[in-house]
Image (cartoon, rainbow, N blue to C red):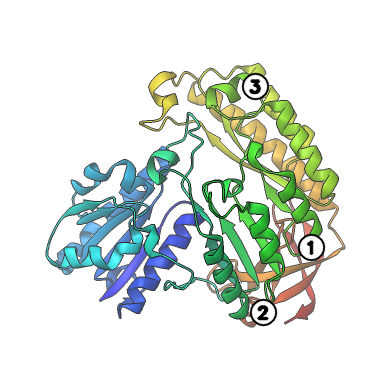
Amino acid sequence: MRFFIETFGCQMNVNESEKMAGLLSEAGHLYTDRLEEADLILVNTCTVRQKSAEKVYGFIGRTLALRKTKPSLRLGVCGCLADAEDRALLRRKGVDFVFGTRAYPALLDILDRVRRSERFVERGDYLARENAFSPIRRYSSHHAWVTIIYGCDKFCSYCIVPYTRGWEKSRAFSDIRAEITALGEGGYREITFLGQNVDSYGKDLKEDPVSFADVLSFAAEVEGVERIWFLTSYPSDFSQAAIDTIANHPNIARAIHLPLQSGSDPVLKKMNRRYTRDEYIDLTLRVRRAIPDAALSTDLIVGFPGETEEDFEQSVNLAETVVFERLNLAMYSPREGTLAQQTLPDDIPYSVKNRRLQVLLDLQKRINKDLNQECLGKNLWVIAEKQTKIGSKLLYGRTDRNRIVIFEGSDDLIGKWVEVSIGKVTAGPLYGDVSQIRD
């Protein structure tokens, strides 16, 4: 059987798609990147915003034409949307089965039911079946995603994730250690730790008290692992121990993502974010005292219910004060089932949301252009990741501060350290020429 996996959403979805591909490949099925060749299509979904869900439904609709030429085709939907809208998805034309975010380790059992022509929803928790040596088909030969904690306990009022991914569940530290060690031995130079809130790692492991700082410390000492990233942190949980660990290990990237969501205390309270504006600023100051070259990035939502112009200006002011190297921006959209959707009117007009979004976009471009200007004429080291687009002679990589650098080079550079002399800067990528290569 040939299978195709379409992945929407975050890096955790990407990692779970790799694991599903591994299970199927080990069982003898063949991966294809051509949709029309597939006998089985899996759609790994996101539902953080309405637009994410619309993309999924659009993709499902596009697969219907394939049924006319291949009636035996089976389509399964998994990921966050599968948990949020399970029965509605199953009723949708073209969908044969649906399974939740914690059911993917049971994929082969699920397919046995599909072969019996069952149409069903599976929302069981099978994460206990997974360990460091479970099959996985990684999309990169030099970078690996490593999920260390599942779920989220924060219940921010606007967020659907706790309802789709469930309560926090940390992986055993011994299992994480085994995976990282194997990755180092297998030639993976980069790893990225994943979790809805990596800082909560270990809090539920009562018999083996460990923390996220312990995970970082161990990984930083593993031979072969040359650069470490992590996503995503929660500001009030980001510990001084984690800050000090990053400061003490140069192979932990200096890019730290601390989602803010709003610079206004009244809005933060309505969002059920568990920190204040001053506490957030204090955190950024502590990070920069310990790690002077830290590059901070954040998430901001504009147009949250009741957000006044003063509230919005507080977000703008905080972004200017902290000087974020990246802003991930979104207009508020209510997600069914969240506290905000149930209790707060979506009362900010689209035109106002859009204007506020543009203000922050313009601010980010100005900040990035100024910061990138400092790189002009410098030599920066990156690990070459991939082509900028299929067939291009241009490759890109990222600096330790998560700045994208584009340069001309052959595919055999992918996965290698490359020093690039920066000759052009923009508000986005940096451009340059290769000056040195290190295997």
Q: Which residue is mark 2?
A: 413
Left or right? Give the position of 329 relative to 238: left
Q: Residues within 10 Å of mark 3 (few under 14, many from 20)?
A: some
Percent x, y of residue 159: 46, 35
The image quadrant where one finds the C terminus is: bottom right
| One can see residue 31 in this view | no
Q: Amino acid at mark 1?
A: Pro
Query: Mark 1 or mark 2, which is nearer to you?
Result: 1
| One can see residue 288 in this view | yes
Q: Earlier in the sequence, mark 1 or mark 3?
A: 1
Cα separation, mark 1 vs mark 3, equals 35 Å
Left or right? Give the position of 187 relative to 124: right
Closer to the camera in the image, 9 or 153: 153
Q: Which residue is mark 1?
A: 250
User: Any mark on residue 265, and which?
Assistant: 3
The relative height of residue 347 versus residue 255 in the rendered view (above or below) is above
Disc 1 secondary structure class: loop
Q: Amino acid at mark 2?
A: Leu
Q: Quadrant of residue 384?
A: bottom right
